[in-house]
Image (cartoon, helix red, strand yellow):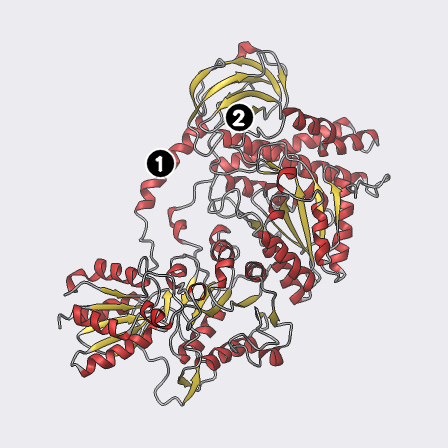
Amino acid sequence: MATEILMPALSPTMEEGTLAKWLVKEGDTVSSGDIMAEIETDKATMEFEAVDEGTIGKILVAEGTEGVKVNTAIAVLLEDGESADDIDTSTPAPEAAQAADAGNEAAPAASEAPAPAPAAPQTDSTPDWPEGTTLKQQTVREALRDGMAEEMRRDDSVFLMGEEVAEYQGAYKISQGMLDEFGAKRVIDTPITEHGFAGIATGAAFGGLRPIVEFMTFNFAMQAIDQIINSAAKTLYMSGGQMGAPMVFRGPNGAAARVGAQHSQDYAAWYMQVPGLKVAMPYSASDYKGLMKTAIRDPNPVIFLENEILYGRSFDVPDLDDYTVPFGKARIWREGSDVTIVSFGIGMSYALAAADQLAEEGISAEVIDLRTLRPMDTDSILKSVMKTNRCVTVEEGWPQGSVGNYISSVIMQQAFDYLDAPVINCTGKDVPMPYAANLEKLALVTTDEVVAAVKQVTYK
Amino acid sequence: MAPRKSTKKPNVSAEELKAYYRDMLLIRRFEEKAGQLYGMGLIGGFCHLYIGQEAVVVGLEAAAEEGDKRITSYRDHGHMLACGMDPNGVMAELTGREGGYSKGKGGSMHMFSKEKHFYGGHGIVAAQVPLGAGLAFADKYKENGRVTFTYFGDGAANQGQVYEAFNMAALWKLPCVFVIENNQYAMGTSQQRSTSSAEIYERGKSFGIPGEAVDGMDVLAVKEAGEKAVAHCRSGDGPYILEIKTYRYRGHSMSDPAKYRTREEVQKMRDERDPIEQVRSLLLTGKHASDEDLKAIDKEIKEIVNDSAEFAKTSPEPAVEELWTDIYATEVPQEA
């Protein structure tokens, strides 16, 4: 049967082109791979090859013709034994036309699909541990190590890799003692090569293991962010659900003290933006432990943002065999009626200190610790704002595109009528972190700024 | 070192030779059809064809055992067909349809098959190299004796993460064959203009990784080199590098006019070194197959490819609900 040769689309954006030159003429025999014509696209002049073998029966579009639409028949190819007289040129190209229609139909349907943000979890205000549970004082450092070690005892496929995690016992001593307990097969010192080992760990997760990757700090993870986002976060989707990367990327994030601009960045807002990732940023030791255990068991890549200044702080930790904290459940640290202060990670220290100070001045603040940023417990925020009618967010990261900006927009869209004042975002200043002690203090968010913001929204 | 040629009297049966012919021809015809469907607007975006490089994957698959893994870049259709993935599923992914390997959500550059141990299909040049080393890391951890084939191009060989992966793979003796498919052009930049040394396989030397160059237009040479590399990895001696000198006949992607090389250069390669023609001539001159035998194979392949195109055109577009699925897993996927 005679085959129509159609004007090809030769780039992702081409809709029409110029048939610059025919390199075959009627009666020529062509076989697959032979160059038949030169076609000018929107980008370049391309050679157009034959796919099937046969004889050029008729050239339908003369060379030099401009504006030839994609899928227009430009020539007819005859198979053995056919003659040019058999050609019927009235047949349009049906397949491509159908495909285009199908594409158009899909577009409006997609816009009716559900909103992009994952549905907020139902507010769950059950306490993290049952009443009467024995509590012990533990530092964040110890709680983190216990969380990892418990999960490594539970599951042989969990292993820890990173710079100085094994023999050095951890650059910040988080993995102290773990090499002794689990051996060099499961507590692995890597060379200083973040991009490489983040990729190897992601490959190991594809291959059925549950890696915990320690970045000495998240500043260095910028070298590895392609593997974290393009490989770890997107593969489940790109593979239609066939394979993904169950793993944890963890390490200290944000400012430490006097380490300058390249070692002091808060990445909360960056990672929070990425579908396919989960993001935890705990404040207290019990949350470090409980969320770490949940993160390791989670079948998705989890970004676990820690804080060096918090490592040495002690908190109550429940003395339970298997203490976990679910993702997407905020903790209300302090109930109040005049204003809602929302924070996470080290921002909680400013939020809680401000609430103490405000209480002395007769202002009652409700303080919410988000604990995880993706999923984010926006229900708890909304519920609180509907009660207090005012909100201040607190974080150390930069102001433009901050976590607080997102929270503000959620409140504005879902509780606008409840607001008695604009939401204020207390953030780090819009500057690279300075080294000088006085300037560094100014660059970070402060308790006084939180207090001032609360007074502003409460008109006090 | 001159690229490895196949030994004079290849230790290969007529049946094996016919199978290589068939497998390479399937890739060639499949890719030609994909090019055609692209021209008709049925395949969108980027589409990187494998035509000319068929002997690389077919030769190496002949050296692989069940359970071995493979991972590659965006020029991935050939790898998938060679490891036994269904042409219908691959073609339907190219057209973005429900019947595609990724339900239409991955496209030409992003396909996977747990069943065939094919780990993608990666669009960021060289990102698959540490990932492949990581798959090998998992196999070593599990002590299961498996080997991973990590494919990348001469262009990717200039990315830093390749050497980060080489270092750790050698340090930890990971069972990984690093396969450099040197098709001589990193998109439009020839190896001479992009790469300081002519012999890329030698770049493993500083990490203690043995390597060799192989004639990638000769499927038997590729198989022979593959067997040696696999044996090295499987015996616990760590990674191995194969620089397979090959050639792509088509542009980098469908929209590449390929003005950086002459038409004569491409034609010469097609006329003198074509991997499929070489096997065809071996079959005919050795009287391992008749013209009729080969015609029957051609016909079978044509049917498979036409069926795949038909399937890819008629498979429906994914349901709109698919936009919101597979973002998060609810349970850990089990390793096949």
Residue B310 place in picture, x, y as percent: 52, 34
Residue B34, located in which quarter of the rendered image? top right
Q: Earlier in the sequence, mark 2 or mark 1?
A: 2
Residue type at mark 1? Asn
Q: Residue at x 50, y 80 (%)?
A: A146
Q: Which secondary structure lies at badge 2? A: strand
Q: Which mark is residue A94?
A: none
Regarding residue B65, the answer to whether it shows in the image is no
Residue A284 in the image: above or below residue B273: below
Chain letter behind tag 2: A
Q: Residues within 10 Å of mark 1 (few under 14, many from 20)?
A: few
Nearest to the eye among marks 2 and 1: give it.
Answer: 2
Residue A24 in the image: above or below residue A121: above
Q: Give the labeled residue for mark 2.
A: A46
Residue B263 place in picture, x, y as percent: 63, 25
Q: Give the labeled residue for mark 1.
A: A104
